[in-house]
Amino acid sequence: MDKSLYKGIWIFAEQKEGILNGTPLELLAKAIELKKINGDEITALLLGNHVEPLADTLISYGADQVIVIDHPVLKEYKTIPYTEATVKMIKKYKPSIFLFGATTIGRDLAPRIMARLGTGLTADCLDLKLEKDGTLVQTKPSYGGNIMCTITIPDHRPQMSTVRPKVFTAIQAEPGRTGKIVLENIDVTEDESTQVLSVSPKETNGEPIDKAEIIVAGGRGIKAKEELALLEELAKLIGGRVAVSRPLVDEKWMTHEDQIGQSGNTVKARFILNIGISGAVQYIVGMQNSDCIVTINKNPAADIFHISSYGAVADYSELLPAIITEIKKRK
Amino acid sequence: MKILVFIKQVPDTINVRIDPKTGNLDRTGLKGVINPFDNNALEAALKIKEETGATITVVSMGPPQTEESLRIALAMGCDEAVILCAKELGGADTLATGYTLASAVKKIEDYDLLLFGRHAVDADTGQCGPIVAEFLNLPQITFATSIKVEENHVICERDFDDCIQKVKVKLPAVVTVCAEINEPRYPSPLGIMKAMKKPLITWTHEDMGCDTERIGKNGSPSIVREIFEPEHTQKDTIMFSGETDEIAKSIVDLLEQQHLI
Ligand SMILES: Cc1cc2nc3c(=O)[nH]c(=O)nc-3n(C[C@H](O)[C@H](O)[C@H](O)COP(=O)(O)OP(=O)(O)OC[C@H]3O[C@@H](n4cnc5c(N)ncnc54)[C@H](O)[C@@H]3O)c2cc1C
Ligand SMILES: Nc1ncnc2c1ncn2[C@@H]1O[C@H](COP(=O)(O)O)[C@@H](O)[C@H]1O
């Protein structure tokens, strides 16, 4: 393979029902950093039906070029047509790097494309660096975050990654920024073997936790399910929502939608209060990018204190009622 | 109906360390177990077998000790096992693994449903299922949280980030399953006894007619450059101390400062 034929940084502009799904803007922010190394253009690949209006948004967040494939078959996400359309574009334009969000769609689609092209794909990256010669150095967790690996794809192109959501921060949009919009008219074959029967929102306790700005999180230190009411009350008073570490999901006190961590959701809150959580890596990777991290734990040696901005060594069953009383007094 | 389940043997704990002397993973004392999500795939297959009388072949690529995990799968109720084992298969990334697994499927010939775990807990990638689907040109459903077989279709609910998607695909197909899908069973003593008599076959890359350029290290575009233990940036934590009431006041001060009340 002649690597010199491959140029440019691509991101997959995931959208659902005409709305950009979080990660594309984060991927663009990272692409802007990579571009500083070798000046390669940033292209967003946008697939869907009636999605062209999103192209301007992608440009305002840093894309130099948006390639749009607007086709009725791409209206709804289906693996096989999306693979076909993306592979056609890769073969035509030959990007050197292709980033996807490590969302359901990204994790479903990227390996399929990588297999069709016979290249490498690194899953769930937490960091990406570009070397002068164009090698992408990808950092990914393994063993549930206990070990980190750096992975390269030296002799194959494109170098593909899925990137964990919420790890990079979108830049401020620059309205009116100009860029190229390319409409690609290609045939996309309908996949008759697959039928989407329905799409329904998940039942959640309020807003999705990955969008929550203010979180009150409880862990195995919470003694009984009823005690979660204390957390609910506090969350209500500060305009937040309750989330949990995994043991409380295993106990079925809350659902997987409420779980923070490696096998749950990544959050990036403005304020997060950890209550009765010890701070296992699998929990920490899901919340460490939050701004103000506050911890209440009765064990002064709990690891969670190391990543907290503020902490208190206390029994929550005494401290939470005292906090709630104090807030009510001041309101 | 014939179901193939793909399982990987992984260390029994993910609390692994790096040996500071060699810079490699310290594997001393680590026992191998079936990747937890693959137990969900096995359970899903066994339930379908109970309903439809399907037969189940369990397949794993790995070193000879992988046989232990395959015996457990047989004891749970699978009918036969295949271990893909040869020195040349070692050092494979997901592309080379996917190619090898797909080669095994082609040799098996007769199959309706291919079940995988959502990901293996050691490498954390979740790519093998879709890769095998691609090599065999099959439809796929990833992250399934429920599964039902209906004549020549499989219907799953799948985790679709903030939504649940219900999808129906034609068989043969690949499905990767989440932990929510079921509670895996344990092998019974009778199952363990029966397992000893069930067929467990070994195939090398040659038996499957693999292209040697596409297996093991040769067939792997990805290279691990370095492994390390993550550093957690230690913050200068400000600790609130005093009586409960004083701590509560300090925390509420902080909440005010953050404009939360
Ligand atoms: C593959 C894999 C994936 C995983 N994914 C996740 C994940 O996504 N999310 C996740 O959270 N975990 C995950 N885990 C589990 C993780 O390793 C830990 O077991 C888990 O995070 C521990 O939860 P915890 O901190 O709530 O409980 P514990 O570790 O039991 O900590 C409880 C804490 O509460 C404190 N406490 C007890 N009583 C009180 C009291 N009265 N007042 C104040 N403090 C008190 C204790 O001092 C202790 O620090 C995963 C594990 C594996 C193997
Ligand atoms: N060596 C292997 N042998 C058999 N199945 C495997 C192997 N590696 C991965 N798998 C299957 O692929 C799934 C995803 O693995 P991975 O892509 O490595 O995260 C696992 O849950 C298994 O079902």
Image (cartoon, rainbow, N blue to C red):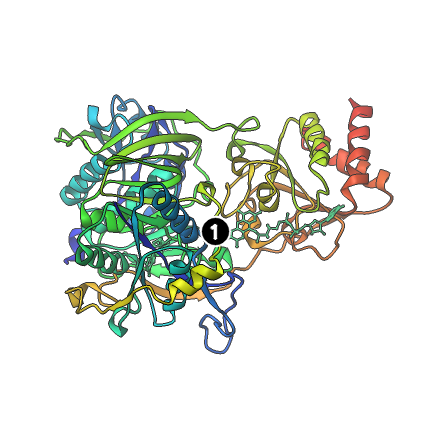
Left-right relation of B244 to B224: right
> Which quarter of the figure is the N terminus of chain B placed in?
top left
Count how many numbered circles sit on residues in the image. Answer: 1
Kind of residue sitting beneath label 1: Arg
The quadrant in which residue A235 appears is top right
> Which chain contains the residue that carries disc 1?
B
Left-right relation of A68 to B147: left
- Counting from the top left corner in percent of width and height, residue B248 is at 80, 37
Which residue is at a point 20% across and 56% down the rendered structure image? Answer: B108
- Counting from the top left corner in percent of width and height, residue B157 is at 38, 34
Q: Is residue A36 visible?
A: no
Q: Where does label 1 land, which residue?
A: B185
Q: Secondary structure at mark 1?
A: loop
Position above or below: A207 against B25: above
Q: Nearer the viewer, residue B224 or B178?
A: B178
Which residue is at a point 18% across and 64% down the rendered structure image? Answer: B208
Position above or below: B21 against B155: below
- Counting from the top left corner in percent of width and height, residue B186 is at 49, 55
Left-right relation of B172 to B6: left
